[in-house]
């Protein structure tokens, strides 16, 4: 139905035009989902935008053909193209929060499409809109039509986006990372919805994603992109059983998962070549484990390895043989009996001010009674969906946010309420690594200065020469070149920046590192590098980690203990095996089942949670989880469940277990 | 980027102008010791012929005769009413008064050629220096836009040199009511405008930066107090506040005549005071802007990382916040500059600007405005003042644009 | 929403008090009434008696803040601060040098001032937004480029030039409308049209450029991409989507521009001989009538705060997020 041939797209920068997408061809049948998979910057979005002819101002279509049902799209006039956009082909975007117009009602925004493409107005249009909203699973559609986007939750906004896309009755739906910005349980709902709609309407779908799990769940056929080129196209079965391109294979290898605990993850060395300096031959050559001389000379041709499975590679081998790149990482023997950081009943409430004189009318209970313990040299993972208070816990531990109540004791001394010198001394023992490697380094300081800052402030190393030596030792430890210290952060990639951030934290020799989603902004292959680094640092230095994340794969790979948070409270806590293998809390169970797994055996037993996390300003009475809990009973609505010990190390807060 | 090329060169004018001004300040103390009565500047010295060769009253540009009829004695004919000959304008022509056009054109051409030769010299120097550094590089592709600079330099030289050359023989822009050369007045006005722009900026800068960052960083009651102060100052319309303050300053000056030994000193003080008042009324905008930015910055992770190390607040402000705000400060300053030059004209017109005896665009326009009523119209003074101001402000505006584009890729 | 507006109103009160204190400090603390008297009466030949008389006539002979002699409540009320500053809150501004009641004078002159300021503001907003949208529509073309160049040139021209030039050309050379003056009732429009026109024209340059930047900022946002993906025509996207979202920053921008309206009014009214607040202020400045200038500072602040309130209210119209929360 859709046929893309040799599409080339470029972005103009100054006088030059750099090709971001360099000659890709694929086709999509009716009723089929074609997934474009690739790391950030490989040109997935550009391809999608090119097909819709929606490239940003700097974008140019250089060459190629795009045909929908045989009609060439690229030669249409702009006015004719508009009849296609939103009509026969529609698109949904990654960020539901910014993709809707904030000052127009939902009804208006859907109505526009009806008016434009179906010439529907007035009551007929309203009827159709109510119908559409119902189809995308929005309750009370009549009321929602008159509401504005800010009155909807993230998942609902994405549903509205889907309704807008469906309004023009498209034959082709392009979804650009439709669930990346959403929580796991909500992602689950949206993926379900997309799959159902596609079957009902027999649409073709182009799904763009970087998540192998989402691919496994949704795609019929898959195209893998690397540096602006398509490198492998395969059916779902072939793709997951016999990936042929070395890049695809490496992507699978780099995934952290439970079976790889205690092993070093395979990483892809180096980085994606920049657009300005593309190698002449195979673009993956510099990073490929099977590189041959011929690879660097000619761009590899397409080779059909099985029916409907082609790959663009010179290498004829098939499966990745285990060539010993995975080394076992020595794990420390942890003595679980000796917690060295103890948090009890920690609370952080932010006041909500309202009315005339900004009186405090309530509190956002971001953290509402959290108790934790971390032993030396071990990793505690704090998992939960966005807004549950994970980051706030981390900051409150470091006293970056003043806790409202509770205590944090480090090696026996109380931190809450410490001031000045004493607090500074305590901070030597704990440091933090932040989520966004681009925001966490001051762009105007040299890397060396960034790393040395903490040493100066905490008086670790006062002699300038010793400090310089320490900095270069640290750079080496985190695997950065020696001259990195004299350069500025913008010269480094995301993964390298995260290494710098780690070096900065290590500079004061802390015993505990609080890692706030340190890999969520990174690609899988880079994530693997950072996880390996963290793991080997733990083995060498015996550092404990508080690992804040929403990514279960990382948790499975790394954590010794797990604490699951929901709305400011910990609902389940225990040894990693206990929580992952035999979760007892309904929320943990649902969360674990909703994570899309990157293999063929789709789980039949996904527990679907309705709705979304409520606001911590106004949590539901009784058990906070009861409005979404599939097993809720009357008791649950009345009181918050107490702590139940399942085993010596495994505790749960649920009436069901008690 | 055709626009960017023009911009760069206008900076040059600005620089040149400010050089005048600085040279003048330096020379002031020394000269004052000798002649206490009249304060001169380097500019005055350079333009001495312009300053001293006054006519009696109005004369049009390039005129050889006055603009008003007078009773003159012509030897042999007794007294007649005629346009008398100028004392200075076109004196060298003697009797050949009708050859003004040819003579002026010829002189201009001579000077133009000279300017062009001078420019060729500069051009050659630039090319050779560049060749040495990187032999292959073509001038058009250099990172620094040499071609634009050179081109505009040519333009400036070709216009300015003949202008000054001619001004030795004629009143290029005519003379005003009391016979002063308009070109000279304009040069002086540029200096006034620049002082107002620069000194005001210097006054408001520390206040705005310090208070803005402190309010944004510490928040809480400090923020409330600072916000309150600038909201109050902001809610008094600027002109009125300035008017009130200037009026009060006038009272101080008038009731303490013993403080000033010369009229020029008084005018200077009034100018400085005006700058202060403008500074106090105009810091609020920048302060608000910086507060907002600091609020955003302080939530950034690198600031939190520094806090996690226990780096002291002041150190965080100096090391992390200030450098990341500098571009905003610079952009705002350059943008304000042109506004200040324009504001001076209006304020002086209203009577709350600089001392009436001081030459500035405002006072020039104010004086010249009356002359529009005459028949036939005396247009040159006004036209010259407006065009000079236009060029100055345009240069500043374009420069502001260039600065903004350089720091803020978004707003290109 | 009502609470929002009420809070805004309440917030205005401390600000007015602040303004009042600032004017008080400026007029009575920086200079003593003695200084003012000396200035008014001529510095050289002034006798202490004359000064005393001048002060008594105007009520400046009282103590500044606390009147220790008068007991009870009068120790606070019988002072310069209370008589001259605090009473401005109830609209009592005292008398001008020529003996007229300032409050009444202000009341009389308010109408002509508004008759110029309001049309200038509204028409100016309309014209500049139209131009800015047009430029945004043709963005990245030669038309846009030269449009911006024209804007920069126009904003580099002194406002005085627009006034003098406009007056000269339209009134004197073409004789289309009277040069200056003001008529009563409906006849007034003939006198108003030129100042309003000039006011609008002089604001075009900076306004258009500002709003164009705002629109271009909006155009890069995700929701615009969504609108394009719906297949809507570009003009509709600009009008329905971009304009509505751009209104909030534009309104914010126009608050900042309000003080320049005052500046414009000052000059404009004196040029065109319109008996408004602006010319009143200029006359007072030239006559060194302290009482009038002081009152005008206060009134100016009040007007500014009222304008601020109106903007706040118009936010609620433009932005549902404020209206509904
Ligand atoms: N507006 C732009 N101007 C210049 N270059 C751009 C622009 N947008 C994207 N690019 C470049 O084009 C390439 C492909 O970008 P694209 O957005 O398609 O990547 P992607 O695969 O969707 O990545 P992600 O997973 O991060 O969304 C990148 O190298 C990017 O830097
Ligand atoms: S063509 Fe060569 S370098 Fe490229 S992926 Fe295949 S084996 Fe590796
Ligand atoms: S307490 Fe009740 S509602 Fe809460 S998780 Fe357990 S079963 Fe569900
Ligand atoms: Mg993308």
Image: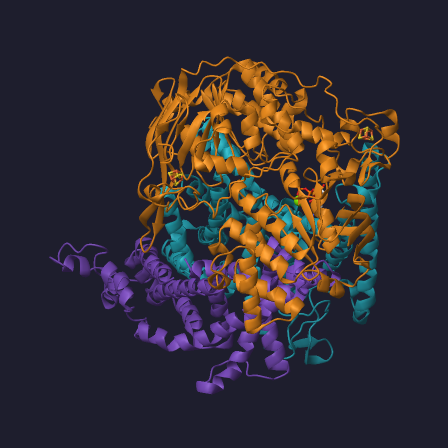
Chain colours: A orange, B cyan, C purple
**On the rendered structure, is A283 left or right of C283?**
right
Q: Is residue B20 visible?
A: no
Q: Residue at x 54, y 79 (%)?
A: C193
x, y percentage for residue B177? 60, 69
- Disc count in the image? 0
Residue pushed farthest left? C71
Q: Is residue A481 visible?
A: yes
User: In front here: B142 or A29?
Assistant: A29
x, y percentage for residue A118? 65, 68
Residue pushed farthest front? A604
x, y percentage for residue A400? 42, 32
x, y percentage for residue A302? 85, 38
Q: Quadrant of residue A20?
A: top right
User: In front here: A529 or A87?
Assistant: A87
Q: Please say if C84 is above or below A355.
A: below
Q: Quadrant of residue A436?
A: top right
**On the rendered structure, is A524 left or right of A502?**
right
Ligand 1 position by quadrant: top right
User: In front here: A582 or A74?
Assistant: A582
Q: Please say if C299 is above or below A534.
A: below
Q: Please say if B363 is above or below A474.
A: below
């Amino acid at each position: 139905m859709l046929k893309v041939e040799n599409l080339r797209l470029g972005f103009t920068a100054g006088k030059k035009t750099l090709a971001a997408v360099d000659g890709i061809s694929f086709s999509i049948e009716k009723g089929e989902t074609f997934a474009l998979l690739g790391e950030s910057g490989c040109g997935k979005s550009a391809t999608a935008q090119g097909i819709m002819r929606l490239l940003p101002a700097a974008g140019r279509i250089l060459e190629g053909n795009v045909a929908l049902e045989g009609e060439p799209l690229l030669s249409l006039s702009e006015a004719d193209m508009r009849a296609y956009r939103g009509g026969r082909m529609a698109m949904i975007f990654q960020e539901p929060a910014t993709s809707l117009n904030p000052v127009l009602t939902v009804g208006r925004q859907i109505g526009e499409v009806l008016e434009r493409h179906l010439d529907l107005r007035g009551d007929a249009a309203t009827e159709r809109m109510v119908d559409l909203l119902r189809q995308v699973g929005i309750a009370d559609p009549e009321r929602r039509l008159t509401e504005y986007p800010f009155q909807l939750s993230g998942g609902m906004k994405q549903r509205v986006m889907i309704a807008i896309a469906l309004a023009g009755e498209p034959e082709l739906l392009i979804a650009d990372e439709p669930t990346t910005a959403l929580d796991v349980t909500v992602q689950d709902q949206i993926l379900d919805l997309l799959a159902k709609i596609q079957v009902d309407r027999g649409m073709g779908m182009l799904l763009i994603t970087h998540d192998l799990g989402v691919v496994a769940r949704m795609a019929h056929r898959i195209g893998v992109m690397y540096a602006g080129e398509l490198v492998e196209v395969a059916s779902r079965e072939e793709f997951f059983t016999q990936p042929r391109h070395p890049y695809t294979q490496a992507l699978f290898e780099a995934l952290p998962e439970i079976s790889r605990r205690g092993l070093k993850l395979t990483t892809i060395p180096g980085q994606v070549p920049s657009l300005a300096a593309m190698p002449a031959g195979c673009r993956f050559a510099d990073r490929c484990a099977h590189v041959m001389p011929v690879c660097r000379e000619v761009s590899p041709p397409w080779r059909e390895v099985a029916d409907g499975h082609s790959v663009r590679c010179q290498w004829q081998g098939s499966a990745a043989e285990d060539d010993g790149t995975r080394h076992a990482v020595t794990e420390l023997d942890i003595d679980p009996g000796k917690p060295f950081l103890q948090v009890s009943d920690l609370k952080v409430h932010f006041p909500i001010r309202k009315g005339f004189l900004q009186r405090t009318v309530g509190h956002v209970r971001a953290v509402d009674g959290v108790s934790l313990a971390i032993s030396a040299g071990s990793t505690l993972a704090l998992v939960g969906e966005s807004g549950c208070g994970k980051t706030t816990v981390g900051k409150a531990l470091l006293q970056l946010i003043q806790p409202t109540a509770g205590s944090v004791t480090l090696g026996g001394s109380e931190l809450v309420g410490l001031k000045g010198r004493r607090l500074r001394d305590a901070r030597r023992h704990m440091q933090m690594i932040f989520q966004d490697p681009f925001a966490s380094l001051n762009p105007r300081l040299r890397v060396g200065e960034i790393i040395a800052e903490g040493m100066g402030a905490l008086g670790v190393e006062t002699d300038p020469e010793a400090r310089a030596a320490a900095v270069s030792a640290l750079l080496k430890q985190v695997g950065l070149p020696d001259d990195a210290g004299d350069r500025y952060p913008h010269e480094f990639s995301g993964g390298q920046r995260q290494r710098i951030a780690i070096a900065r934290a290590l500079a004061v020799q802390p015993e505990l590192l609080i890692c706030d989603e340190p890999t969520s902004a990174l690609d899988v292959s880079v994530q693997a590098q950072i996880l390996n680094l963290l793991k080997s640092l733990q083995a060498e230095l015996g550092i404990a980690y508080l690992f804040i994340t929403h990514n279960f794969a990382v948790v499975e790979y790394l954590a010794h203990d797990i604490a699951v948070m929901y709305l400011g409270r910990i609902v389940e806590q225990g040894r990693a095996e206990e929580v992952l293998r035999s979760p007892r809390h309904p929320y943990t169970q649902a969360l674990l089942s909703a994570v899309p797994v990157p293999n063929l055996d789709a789980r039949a037993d996904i527990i679907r949670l309705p709705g979304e996390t409520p606001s911590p300003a106004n949590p539901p009475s009784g058990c906070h989880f009861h409005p979404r809990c599939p097993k809720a009973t009357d008791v649950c609505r009345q009181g918050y469940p107490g702590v139940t010990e399942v085993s010596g190390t495994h505790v749960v807060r649920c009436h069901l277990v008690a | 980027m055709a626009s960017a090329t023009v911009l760069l060169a206008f900076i040059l004018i600005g620089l040149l102008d400010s050089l005048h001004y600085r040279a003048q300040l330096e020379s002031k103390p020394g000269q004052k010791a000798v002649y206490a009565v009249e304060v001169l500047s380097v500019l005055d010295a350079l333009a001495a012929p312009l300053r001293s060769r006054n006519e009696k009253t109005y004369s049009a540009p390039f005129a050889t005769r006055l603009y008003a009829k007078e009773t003159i004695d012509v030897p042999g004919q007794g007294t007649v009413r005629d346009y008398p000959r100028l004392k200075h304008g076109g004196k060298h022509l003697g009797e050949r008064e009708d050859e003004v056009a040819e003579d002026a054109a010829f002189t201009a051409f001579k000077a133009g050629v000279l300017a062009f030769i001078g420019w060729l010299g500069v051009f050659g120097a630039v090319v050779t220096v560049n060749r040495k550094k990187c032999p292959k590089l073509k001038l058009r592709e250099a990172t620094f836009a040499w071609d634009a600079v050179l081109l505009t330099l040519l333009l400036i030289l070709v216009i300015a040199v003949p202008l000054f050359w001619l001004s030795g023989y004629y009143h290029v822009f005519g003379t005003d009511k009391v016979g002063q050369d308009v070109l000279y007045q304009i040069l002086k006005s540029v200096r006034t405008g620049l002082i107002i722009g620069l000194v005001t900026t210097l006054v408001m800068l520390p206040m705005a930066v310090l208070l803005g960052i402190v309010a944004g960083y510490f928040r809480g009651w400090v923020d409330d107090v600072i916000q309150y102060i600038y909201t109050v100052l902001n809610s008094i319309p600027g002109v009125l506040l300035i008017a009130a303050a200037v009026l009060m300053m006038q009272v101080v000056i008038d009731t303490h005549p013993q403080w000033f030994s010369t009229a020029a000193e008084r005018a200077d003080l009034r100018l400085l005071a005006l700058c202060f008042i403008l500074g106090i009324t105009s810091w609020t905008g920048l302060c608000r802007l910086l507060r907002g930015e600091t609020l955003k910055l302080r939530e950034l992770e690198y600031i939190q990382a520094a806090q996690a190390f226990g780096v002291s607040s002041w150190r965080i402000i100096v090391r992390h916040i200030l450098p990341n705000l500098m571009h905003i400060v610079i952009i705002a300053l350059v943008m304000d500059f042109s506004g200040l030059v324009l504001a001076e004209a209006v304020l002086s017109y209203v009577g709350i600007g600089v001392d009436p005896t001081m030459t500035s665009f405002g006072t020039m326009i104010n004086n010249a405005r009356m002359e529009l009523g005459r028949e036939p119209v005396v247009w040159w003074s006004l036209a010259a003042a407006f065009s000079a101001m236009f060029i100055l402000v345009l240069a500043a505006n374009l420069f502001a644009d260039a600065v903004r584009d350089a720091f803020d890729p978004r707003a290109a | 929403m009502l609470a929002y507006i009420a809070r805004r109103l309440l917030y205005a009160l401390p600000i007015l008090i602040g303004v009042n204190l600032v004017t008080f400090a400026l007029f009575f603390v920086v200079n003593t009434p003695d200084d003012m008297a000396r200035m008014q009466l001529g510095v050289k030949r002034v006798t202490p008696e004359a000064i005393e008389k001048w002060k008594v006539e105007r009520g400046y002979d009282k103590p500044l803040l606390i009147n220790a002699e008068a007991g009870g409540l009068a120790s606070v009320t019988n002072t310069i601060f209370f008589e001259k500053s605090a009473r401005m809150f109830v609209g009592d501004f005292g008398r001008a040098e020529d003996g007229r009641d300032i409050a009444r004078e202000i009341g009389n002159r308010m109408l002509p001032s508004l008759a110029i300021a309001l049309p200038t503001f509204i028409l100016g907003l309309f014209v500049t937004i139209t131009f800015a949208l047009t430029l945004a529509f043709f963005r990245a073309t030669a038309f846009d480029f030269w449009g911006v160049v024209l804007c920069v040139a126009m904003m580099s021209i002194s406002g005085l030039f627009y006034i003098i030039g406009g007056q000269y050309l339209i009134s004197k050379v073409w004789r289309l409308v009277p040069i200056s003056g003001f008529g009563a009732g409906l006849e007034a429009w003939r006198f108003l049209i030129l100042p309003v026109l000039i006011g609008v024209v002089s604001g075009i340059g900076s306004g258009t450029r500002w709003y164009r930047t705002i629109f271009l900022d909006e155009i890069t946002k995700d929701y615009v991409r969504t609108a394009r993906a719906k297949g809507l025509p570009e003009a509709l996207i600009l009008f329905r989507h971009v304009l509505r979202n751009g209104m909030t920053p534009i309104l914010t921008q126009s608050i900042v521009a309000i003080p320049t309206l005052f500046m414009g009014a000052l000059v404009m009214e004196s040029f065109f001989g319109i008996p408004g607040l602006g010319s009143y202020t200029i006359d007072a400045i030239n006559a060194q009538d302290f009482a009038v200038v002081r009152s005008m500072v206060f009134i100016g602040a009040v007007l500014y705060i009222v304008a601020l309130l109106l903007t706040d209210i118009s936010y609620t119209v433009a932005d549902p997020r404020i209206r509904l929360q």
